[in-house]
Image: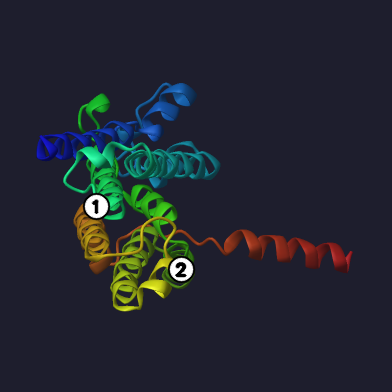
Amino acid sequence: MDILITILVLCGCLVLGYLLGSISNGIIIGKIRTNKDIRDYGSHNAGGTNAGRVMGAKWGIIVILLDMLKTITAVLTSYFVCKYSGVAQFTVFADDVTEFSELAYILASVGAIIGHSFPIFFKFKGGKCVATFAGIVVASSWVSLILGFIVFMLVLIIWKHVSLASMIGSLSCALVSIVYVLLPFEINSLFMNLAPASWYYVALMFGATIYLWYRHKANIGRLLRHEESVIDITKKFKRNKAKANVNTND
C-alpha cells in the first residue's frame, strides 16, 4: 500500500507540473491582444522570445515572467504539500520526508518542461523551455539564479544571441549543481531554497539542460552558419546616452 500511495503522489506531482506547464501564456496573450497564434510567425514557437518578436519586447517579457511563474507554482506546490501535509507518512519515504519532497518537486519540474514543450491545451506545440528552466532555478537555488542570470547577460551582451545566452546560462546552472552536492551538507543547504541539492537535483539540471539544447537544435545550426538573429540590448542605453549628450550640448 505504501508503494502504491508513493507512486500516486509522485505521479500527481508530475501531472500537476504538466498541466500547469501546458498553460502557454504566449499563445493566450497573443490571441487576446492580436487575435493571432504567435506560432504562425517568427520562430513558430510559443515562447517569450517569439512573443516579443510578434507583440513587442514588453509583452515578450510578460510572457517569460508568466511562464516562469507557472513553473515556480508547480515546483513549490509539490514540494510544500509533500513536505508538510503529512502524506509522506503513508509512503515509503515516511522516515525521509526531505528526500520525498525533493523528488516531488523534481517530478513537477519535469512535468512542467514536458507541458511547456507539448501543451495538451494547444495541440502539443509549445515553447523551447527557457522560461521553464529559469522558473525551476528561481524556485530551487538563489545562487544558481544569480550565476545563471550573470552568465546569460554576459553572453547576450557580447554575442547578442538570446539562444546562445540561454544555452550557456543553463549549462552554467547544471555545472554548479555538481559543486553543491560535493560540498558539506551545511554549506550545500545554504545555496538552495528548498531541499539541499542531491544527485537527483544534478540529474534534473543536466537533463533539463540537454533537453533545452535539443530544443534549440535549429538555433545551433543557424549559429554555426552565422544566420542566427541578433538582439543588441545595449542599443537602448546607447540611444539614451546620445540623447543625454545632445541635451547637454544644447
Q: Is residue 128 visible?
A: no
The amino acid type found where label 2 is placed reads Leu
Q: Which residue is mark 1?
A: 95
Q: Residue at x 37, y 42 (%)?
A: 71
Q: Is residue 135 above or below residue 6?
A: below
Residue lying at the far right of the rendered structure: 250
Q: Residue at x 23, y 33 (%)?
A: 12
Q: Is residue 237 visible?
A: yes
- Quadrant location, the C terminus: bottom right
Image location (x, y in percent) of residue 197: 32, 64
Q: Quadrant of residue 141?
A: bottom left
Image location (x, y in percent) of residue 157: 49, 69
Q: Name the foreground residue: 53 vs 197.
A: 197
Image location (x, y in percent) of residue 143: 46, 67
Q: Quadrant of residue 171?
A: bottom left
The amino acid type found where label 1 is placed reads Asp
Q: Which mark is residue 54?
A: none
Mark 2, secondary structure of its residue: helix
- Quadrant location, the N terminus: top left
Q: Residues within 10 Å of mark 2 (few under 14, many from 20)?
A: some
Q: Residue at x 37, y 65 (%)?
A: 169
Q: Which residue is mark 2?
A: 190
Question: How many numbered marks are there?
Answer: 2
